[in-house]
Amino acid sequence: MKKEILIPYQTIVIKEFLRFARIWIQTILPSVVTMFLYIIIFGNFIGERIGEIKNFSYMDYIIPGLIIMPVISNSYMNVVGSFYSSRFMKSIEELLVSPVPNNIILLGYITGGVLRGFAVGIAVYVVVTFFTDLEIVNIWLTVFMTFMTAFLFSTAGFINAVFAKTWDDINIVPTFILAPLTYLGGTFFAIDLLPEIWQNISLFNPIAYIVSAFRYGFLGIEEMNIEFSILIITSITFILYIIALSLLSKGTGIKN
Amino acid sequence: MSENAIDIINLDKIYKNRVQALNCINLSVKKGDLFAFLGPNGAGKSTVIGIISSLVTITSGRVCVFGDDIQQKPELVKRNIGLVPQEYNLNQFITVEETMFNIAGYFGIEKRLAAEKIYKLLNQLGIWNKRKNTPRELSGGMKRRMMIAKALIHDPKLLILDEPTAGVDTELRLNMWDFFKELNEQGVTIILTTHYLEEAERLCKNLAIIHKGNIVQKSTMDEIYRIKNQHTYIVKTTQPLNGMPVIDDCEIDKIDSYTCEITTDTMSVTDIIEKLKYMKIDVGSILNKRNKLEEVFIQLTDD
């Protein structure tokens, strides 16, 4: 068990961790700088004019969203970039000719994405502590939601990498799907303050459930039912995992 | 336990673009063999190798490695195979040493043991002092050696070499031949594909030739020599040829005023020299135009 499963898993995870850690200026720092600017501009300059939302200052209200945003994009980009570059350089063949089970290959890449998600999330949180003395209400739920979010988007990134044919293809989903869903998912506003039609549309946005559940863990505000949000996020993650595993087993995009 | 390292049974491969790469091929390679798998470009060699090493999917048919079906027991089969692919598949951003440790990890080899194996292999292949370099900093020959080291880290019982000496200089090629022979003597079954037919002739005892997805020849190297008796010699004379010499049972083509090509299936080199001498033609040198394997290869794969 140890030799056949644990060593290969550990190898893939360390490889993936070193990949982003070595180039932290490209992988971790940009998100921290971007979120710092969001906090300064939206939190301080604009936030003071907006006032309070649900008894929190505007800056405190948007902080959970500002932390989860880079977790989403970094976990996604880590896996899509890493797996696609392995395909591009053909070094993925090293794994395909080895006896590593497909589940372990997939989990290894996802763990790499989750680690990067956590690394960025923690880095942004450290920056946030300079601007607010906000305390996390439910640390375990916050950590769980960070994990589930990173897991979900790492898996989605893997699926994107399997189908990508060019480097451009790995940027299409983050730019045209993830970014709009994130901005419309309640990061900067409360969904229940929207007109009813937009509230109903938001029910189809999975990122709205993520932001809501993460905000619940962070601030204790329940905007969407927390159990239902966790169920939705877990279900989507499970479905994406099954799809990714099936693609890997069939060899889609990696075997002729 | 099977006596064969590889059994390919009724193997078909049709790619998504509907190209039929393999047409119901059957092939066996005995354990401990050093087997040449030859064919022109696009014949299906790399497809067969890709299928054995799990990089290409099977359309229909079966492939067994040491008696185990690659589709039923893929993880077990992969433990026994080392692959040196034709194209470099190296991660360009990490060092030789790190790549080697990663591959050892994929095969479940613990770090301490992996370090010993890496030291031994990189030294044997003469690239130990390049272990801290990335593949971008290596020459073509060094990259080839790194590919071989990668394939051997887990001590495979079957080594598949897809054009392992392509693009390497003569000295390195000769060293590699010795290395492969030594591995084979240690009991490793080797399948070699190459465009250097001399390489196959020098190293291998048995061979198969594939053409347009069909196995057109499977025999021992000795049998190849018996198939083809025809030789083509290039004769250079010391003085200009006056007209075309005529020798019974020989086809003669004049190349230039000092050179002609003589093709025969009955006469020896000595006979030819004597006949030319009788015609007062002084032979400066006489060379065999092609080796026999080349002759058979061209005959079997010529459209």
Image (cartoon, coloured by chain):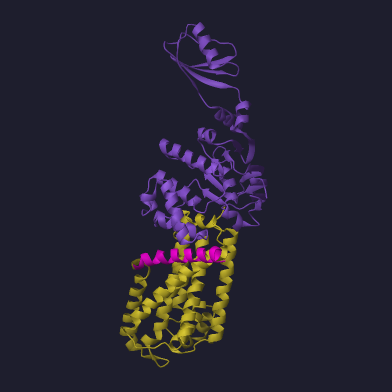
Chain colours: A yellow, B purple
Identify which residue, A128 or B276, lies in the foreground: B276
Q: Quadrant of residue A35?
A: bottom left
* Residue located 40% across and 79% down the image: A66
Question: Is residue B12 within the magenta segment?
Answer: no
Tell me where residue B205 appears, x and y as whole percent: 58, 35
Identify which residue, A60 or B123, lies in the foreground: B123
Q: Quadrant of residue A118?
A: bottom left
Instruction: Magenta stretch: give its range.
Output: A1-24
Q: How many marks?
A: 0
User: Relative to B29, is B154 above or below?
Assistant: below
Tell me where residue B123 appears, x and y as whole percent: 41, 48
Question: Is residue A13 within the magenta segment?
Answer: yes
* Residue located 51% across and 47% down the image: B85
User: Relative to B295, is A253 above or below?
Assistant: below
Confirm whether residue A36 shows in the render: yes
Confirm whether residue A179 shows in the render: no
Tell me where residue A86 appears, x and y as whole percent: 47, 58
Identify which residue, B232 or A169, lies in the foreground: B232
* Residue located 44% across and 59% down the image: A167
Task: Give the overall secondary structure of the magenta segment.
Answer: helix
Q: Quadrant of residue A73?
A: bottom left
Position of residue B115 in the picture relative to residue B56 (left or right): left
* Residue located 52% across and 33% down the image: B202
Q: State which quarter of the image contains the N terminus of chain A.
A: bottom right
Position of residue A237 in the picture relative to residue A37 (left or right): right
Tell me where residue A219 appears, x and y as whole percent: 43, 88
Outermost residue, bottom direction? Answer: A55
User: Relative to B166, is B231 above or below?
Assistant: above
